[in-house]
Amino acid sequence: MGIKVSIESHAGFCSGVNAAIKQAEDVLLEKGSVYCLGEIVHNKAELARLVDKGLLVINYTQFENLKNATVLIRAHGEPPETYQIARKNNIELLDASCPIVKKLQFRIKNDFEKSVNTDFQVVIYGNAGHAEVIGLSGQISHKAILVKEPADLLQIDFRKPVRLYSQTTMGIEGYRQIASLIEEQMLDANKETMPELQVNNTVCKQVSRLVPYFTEFAKRHQIIIFVSGKSSSNGKYLYNICKQANANTFMVAGINELCKEWFDVISYAGICGATSTPHWLMQEIADFIENNF
Ligand code: SF4
């Protein structure tokens, strides 16, 4: 008897990525080609599919030198400078920024502008250099303190108030941990009156809601093949969730990364993926395992 493979039913694109890809496909169908500022999705296979259809991925230097063109903005969102350059260079922007990210950008900007206490520090928990984090910090002229590891907290002045936000695709446990470390340090640094610590729950629920489903699914299968691009933040996080529930979990970007030996004594395999993993790729891998191992 061969291996029976099932795909976790909640795995795959979140609404933000789905809408951005749909927008790209629509415009490619109409125009044949369109520029996209940065990789539209952290998944090489899906990106290659769209590049094949005419998507032209450009970097920021190329964007700055572009004039009178149409450019797609991906779900991660952009800082205000991108919109300024577009206005200056007569670039039409097709804005596929995820509405959840847009809302968070607005919240950070609004909290900052309407604050009477100018002493507070905006702290963002996320991956420095990630497009979404650049877009968020850009809302307040890149004045945010970016943290990911406990060592990064040294940048914070614990005697002053803190407003903490998270990149939408970070893990909730890591966020809580960073928030309690900040609180501890603030308590230590302020024996008399504790300055305000505002922890904003900005982890996207479309990522956090997957945790119980993936945990349960990983426990029910002998092996989990987690399909994700290596640079996907939520991919790394959700892979670790599966790995904690089932040590026999492996991350692959495509068929060529599968190892035959993993399946030697396996009857039931499960496929999971990130919010940037296309369903067709998970299906391709499931079919390959069923037909070849
Ligand atoms: S993870 Fe959430 S916030 Fe990020 S693109 Fe997807 S839906 Fe939007």
Image: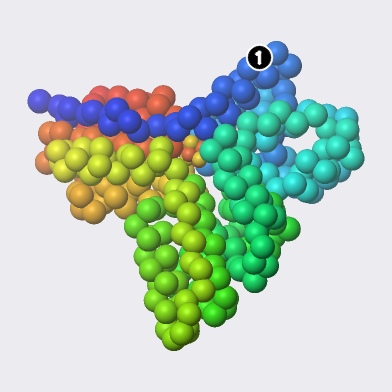
Please provide percent x and percent y for residue 229: 46, 43
Q: Pick the quarter of the image with the N terminus.
A: top left
- Check the image and tell me how it is coloured: rainbow
Residue 224 in view of the camera: no
> Residue beneath label 1, please?
29
Q: Residues within 10 Å of mark 1 (few under 14, many from 20)?
A: few
* Picture layout, residue 3 above or below residue 237: above
Q: Quadrant of residue 111?
A: bottom right
Please provide percent x and percent y for residue 87: 86, 37
- Which residue is more in the foreground, 224 or 292? 224
The three-letter code of the residue at mark 1 reads Leu
Give the structural element (helix, strand or loop) at label 1.
Answer: helix
Q: Pick the quarter of the image with the C terminus.
A: top left
Find out if the beta carbon at label 1 lies less than 8 Å from the nearest ligand 1 atom: no
Q: Residue at x 15, y 33 (%)?
A: 268
The answer to whether residue 199 is left or right of residue 143 is left
